Amino acid sequence: MTKADIVERVSDRCGISKKDSIEMVELVFSILKNTLEIGEDIKISGFGKFEIKNKHARKGRNPQTGDAITIEARRILTFKPSTILKNNINS
């Protein structure tokens, strides 16, 4: 499913114009993106939780040369689906 498909479904189900549904979908995605960028978690009841985790710097190796390297610290985004979503997918 693409963003265009989401816009189409929002337009159909809410009975609003595609222009309005595009603005609505873009706004929701913008809020989600900005919230995650500042490091806040997002928990949507019945759907799941988006969480930012910090990975510390660690030692690794280049698989081609075998040389030791340092992998820089970084932030990663994880998603944990809710039990309701898991049950709906697996039923």
Image: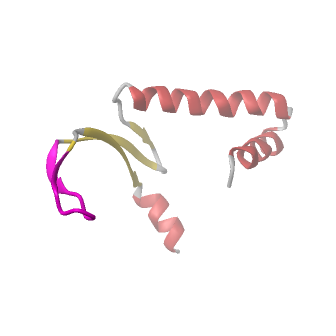
The quadrant where residue 23 appears: top right
* 4 versus 26 height, above or below: below
Residue 19, horizontal then vertical, whole percent: 83, 29
> In the image, which residues are magenta?
57-70
In the rendered image, the quadrant that contains the N terminus is bottom right
Q: Which residue occupies the extreme bottom position in the image?
A: 91
Residue 45, horizontal then vertical, whole percent: 45, 45
Foreground of the two, 27 or 10: 27
Report the coloring of the rendering.
secondary structure
* 3 versus 27 height, above or below: below
Residue visible at 49% across and 31% down? 33
Residue visible at 67% across and 34% down? 25
Question: How many marks on residues?
Answer: 0
Foreground of the two, 68 or 56: 68
Q: Is residue 86 magenta?
A: no
Q: Which residue occupies the extreme front position in the image?
A: 65
Left/right placement of residue 73 relative to residue 16 reads left
Foreground of the two, 70 or 49: 70
Left/right placement of residue 12 relative to residue 1 reads right
Residue 7, horizontal then vertical, whole percent: 75, 41
Foreground of the two, 42 or 33: 33
Residue visible at 53% across and 68% down? 89
Residue visible at 33% across and 43% down? 76
* 79 versus 20 height, above or below: below
